[in-house]
Image: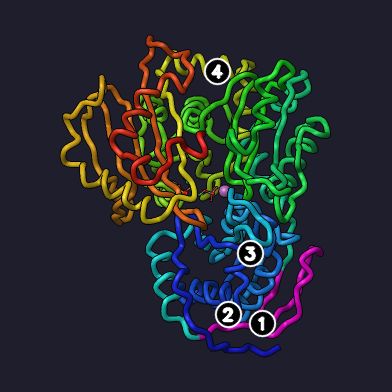
């Protein structure tokens, strides 16, 4: 087998976003496109000769082709061992665990997460470092810089590896191991949670519905919920990963997991409903008759985590992304532990987890996780909920009601305006940014603005700075509006408006969210004039 140095020219658009490089499949299918990006990753790293690389993906269209390319390139670039999930499958949290468990140098995860898949839909490549977490900005910046000047990539002439058979193959000087994608992850979950208690809960007639959305969590959820925990067959729906996710968005929110939501609100609802996304890192939690917002879920999990064996000794701290509601802040305060507010994206949690400063982290976008891996973890959140339900033997509704009565309630919604013209979207943000100095002290109807800023983060562990991470408008009494642009889309821009009303304990805790935040929604429009800039009068997605 010979190593070839292939001459190439740069593509100008290989800047990683919130979570890796995401583009339409036809973009990735251009000659040299994936190769350039993968070589740019390797060229930005040092010291991996003879070390282990983990490769896996969420099974979407184009997954297998890029896995073969990545194997040939990793071998040609000098990695000693390459671990690949069988079928090219590894959920994002499972990949994170495999990297850590096997002491790998890093991993390449092929996914566009919650974005749709198929021949004309989305694909993505992300690099994770040795701690199992997404590469920090310093590395993603280096990858982008390298992609602008790259002039050759290195690849081995070799036959395709059989991805469907566990075992060992030699590719050049490297050993390729095809591993069971589910086994290591399942063992980790058994360490963290009281499977016997959850099994007893299910045995007592507690009913679960889990929607894998034809994405990567199917095999994991089937093994854990149905095989290990004894839930009846059929508990896991859409459990077979499909290259196009059955034509759906594998995004576990109230729009794309609508059927589950409707069922959970109906008279025959199971006790607990959940879903995960394309690559298995997100979670949707719905109790009988009650949707738990991801921000509330983070707070409720943190408040009850000690009921699970893996967290019995308590939490060192909680971290949340800036747009995530302040519900977790009140739990941290009550527990007497620190609360960290980071920019959007899981890569900002890595240092806090590594340093032992935070144990549980979460984002309003339905990502929740802990120090067990360095990624957000959908099934982990589901299992922690089940462990808490098994320990408390109360309904999700009761747990939520008691939580709000103790901590107060953060009514919360995110309004997304999708596929907006990029210039118009930039203009929205620029005009709000331009008003930042004038907003503090201003009133909009009965709401008084206390502070307004462009969020910047100073990492307390490595001292790095990140600027321009979203605009915060903070109101008296703890309510908030946040504006930012998405960094994961592949066409046009998405404007995200995050709206939150804080209602203290003793206040009106049982309102409909839409009513509770109506004045803030109006204030957001008054401040940003989204209609004027974009012509859009209503959001495309409300979650
Ligand atoms: C979105 C979410 C963010 C999340 C990111 C990756 O980013 O808002 O919280 O970390 O997706 O999630 P953005 O830049 O589009 O707002 V995953 O599950 O899709 O990789
Ligand atoms: Co995801």
Q: Is residue 41 left or right of residue 434?
A: right
Kindly report the distance in space between the C-alpha atoms of the residues bearing marks 3 and 1. 17 Å
Q: On residue 55, which mark appears? A: 3
**From mark 4 to mark 3, how far is it between C-alphas?**
39 Å
Does 402 sit above or below residue 514? above
Characterize the local packing of mark 3: few (<14), some (14-19) or many (20 or more) Cα atoms within 10 angstroms.
Answer: many
Residue sitting nearer the eye, 309 or 148: 148
Q: Residues within 10 Å of mark 4 (few under 14, many from 20)?
A: some
Mark 3–mark 2 Cα distance, whole angstroms, equals: 15 Å
Image quadrant for the N terminus?
bottom right
Q: Which mark is residue 173?
A: 1
Inter-mark Cα distance, 1 to 4:
55 Å
Are discs 1 and 2 less than 8 Å apart at CB? yes
Q: Residue 220, relative to residue 57: is it above or below?
A: above
As helix, strand or loop, the secondary structure at mark 4 comes to helix
The boundaries of the magenta stretch are 152-176
**Image position, residue 340 (x, y; %):** 35, 40
Q: Earlier in the sequence, mark 3 or mark 1?
A: 3
> Which numbered disc, 4 or 3, marks the residue that appears first in the sequence?
3
Q: Counting other residues with Cα less than 10 Å from the Cα at mark 2, is it few (<14), some (14-19), or many (20 or more)?
A: some
Using the numbered discs, state the Cα–Cα distance from disc 4 to disc 2 in whole angstroms: 52 Å
Residue denoted by label 4: 399
The first of marks 1 and 2 along the sequence is: 2
> Sequence order check: which comes first, mark 1 or mark 4?
1
Marks 1, 4: nearer the viewer: 4
Q: Any mark on residue 49, and which?
A: none
Judging by the rendered image, the residue that carries numbered circle 2 is: 78
User: Closer to the camera: disc 3 or disc 2?
Assistant: 3
- The residue closer to the viewer here, 387 or 22, is 22
Instruction: Count the labels in the image.
Output: 4
């Amino acid at each position: 087998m010979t190593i070839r140095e292939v001459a190439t020219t740069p593509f100008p658009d290989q800047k990683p976003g919130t979570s890796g490089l995401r583009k339409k499949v036809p973009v990735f299918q251009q000659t040299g496109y994936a190769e350039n990006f993968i070589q740019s990753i390797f060229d930005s790293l040092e010291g991996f000769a003879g070390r282990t690389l983990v490769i896996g993906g969420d099974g979407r269209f184009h997954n297998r082709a890029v896995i073969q390319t990545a194997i040939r390139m990793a071998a040609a670039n000098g990695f000693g061992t390459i671990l690949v999930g069988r079928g090219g499958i590894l959920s994002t949290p499972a990949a994170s665990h495999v990297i850590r468990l096997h002491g790998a140098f890093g991993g390449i995860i092929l996914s566009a997460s919650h974005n749709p898949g198929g021949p004309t839909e989305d694909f993505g490549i992300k690099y994770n470092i040795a701690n199992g977490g997404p590469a920090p900005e310093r590395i993603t910046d280096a990858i982008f810089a390298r992609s602008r000047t790259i002039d050759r990539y290195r690849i081995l002439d070799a036959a395709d590896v059989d991805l469907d058979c566990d075992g060992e193959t030699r590719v050049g000087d490297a050993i390729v191991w095809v591993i069971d994608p589910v086994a290591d992850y399942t063992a980790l979950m058994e360490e963290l949670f009281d499977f016997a208690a959850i099994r007893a809960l299910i045995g007592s007639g507690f009913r679960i519905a889990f929607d894998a959305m034809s994405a990567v969590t199917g095999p994991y959820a089937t093994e854990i919920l149905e095989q290990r925990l004894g839930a009846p067959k059929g508990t896991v729906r859409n459990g077979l990963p499909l290259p196009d996710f059955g034509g759906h968005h594998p995004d576990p929110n109230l729009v794309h997991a609508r059927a589950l939501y409707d069922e959970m609100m109906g008279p025959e609802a199971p006790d607990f409903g959940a879903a995960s996304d394309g690559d298995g890192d997100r979670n949707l939690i719905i109790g009988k008759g009650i949707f738990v917002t991801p921000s509330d879920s983070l707070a409720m999990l943190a408040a009850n985590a000690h009921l699970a064996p893996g967290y019995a000794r308590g939490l060192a701290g909680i971290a949340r992304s800036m747009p995530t509601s302040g519900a977790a802040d009140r739990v941290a305060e009550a527990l007497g532990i620190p609360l960290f507010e980071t920019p959007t994206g899981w890569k900002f949690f890595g240092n806090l987890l590594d340093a032992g400063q935070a144990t549980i982290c979460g984002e309003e976008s339905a990502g929740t996780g802990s120090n067990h891996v360095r990624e957000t973890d959908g099934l982990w959140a589901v299992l922690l909920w089940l462990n808490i339900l098994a320990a408390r033997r109360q309904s999700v509704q009761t747990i939520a009601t008691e939580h709000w009565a103790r901590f107060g309630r953060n009514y919360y919604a995110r309004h997304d305006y999708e596929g907006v013209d990029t210039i118009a979207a930039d203009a929205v943000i620029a005009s709000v940014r331009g008003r930042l100095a004038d907003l503090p002290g201003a009133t909009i109807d009965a709401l008084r603005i206390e502070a307004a800023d462009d969020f910047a983060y100073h990492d307390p562990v490595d001292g790095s700075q990140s600027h321009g991470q979203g605009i915060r408008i903070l109101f008296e009494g703890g309510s908030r509006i946040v504006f930012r642009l998405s960094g994961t889309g592949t066409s046009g821009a998405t404007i995200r408006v995050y709206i939150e009303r804080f209602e203290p304990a003793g206040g009106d805790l049982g309102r409909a969210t839409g009513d509770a935040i109506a004045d803030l929604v109006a204030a957001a429009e008054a401040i940003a004039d989204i209609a004027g800039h974009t012509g859009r009068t209503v959001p495309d997605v409300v979650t």
